[in-house]
Image (cartoon, rainbow, N blue to C red):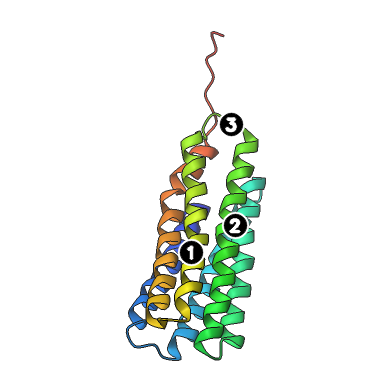
Amino acid sequence: MTRYQALTVYATLIIVTGLILMLLSIYPTRLIQYVVAFGMLSSAFFAFYTAYKSHDMQIPLHYHALHAIGMVVYGFAILFFANDIQRFFNITIFFLTFYGMAEMIFCFQLLMLRQKFISARIIGFRLLIGFFITTGAIFILATSFSDKKIALLASGAVFVFSGVFLIVFKSVLKKADKPILTDSRV
């Protein structure tokens, strides 16, 4: 399995976890705790594998390893500490804030590279994604006290959003691996 296939699997697992969370938001049960924990721990396994396959590239290695560690901590925290819905929200809010900030930090690392294949538009778009994920965490915080079903729905939507954009930006990572062709006449 290549690192791009592993990345696709871990992004798909995040999407599926988000979709199941959205479906379970209609009638919240304790099953949410186990589905989210299993989904994130499974996703973390493939994120670690993606990081392992990226061992020769510093930024992707750290990016995927950071995601994997965050998902492991989140998965185990949900599994062992989310005994009620409010604790579930508190842990999820913390994780999504971490995840959004990690996206923004990754953008700044890309910006420091100053390589030709990375456009300012892509970096700006990824910053917006990180900002959206962090804003989603704030929205979940705001709604978790008044409407738990909406907060669960928003949690699932943010997971789906983040998984989709991991897949979308896989193409940017593929471009980063290709050598930049230079004109031999110069």
Q: Judge depth for marks 3 and 2 and give the one in front.
A: 2
Alpha-carbon neighbours of circle 1 within 10 Å: few (<14), some, or many (≥20)? many
Relative vertical location of residue 113 with respect to residue 94 in this rendering, above or below: above
Q: Quadrant of the C terminus?
A: top right
In front of the other: 141 or 114:
141
Residue 58 placement (x, y as % from top left)? 67, 46
Residue 157, by quadrant, is bottom left
The residue identified by callout 2 is 101
Mark number displayed over residue 10: 1
Q: Name the N-terminal-most of marks 3 and 2.
A: 2
Residue 80 placement (x, y as % from top left)? 61, 87
Relative vertical location of residue 129 with respect to residue 136 in this rendering, above or below: above
Q: Amino acid at mark 2?
A: Met
- Residue name at image x 38 percent, y 74 percent: 153
Distance from Cα at disc 1 to Cα at disc 2: 19 Å
Q: Residue furthest top?
A: 185
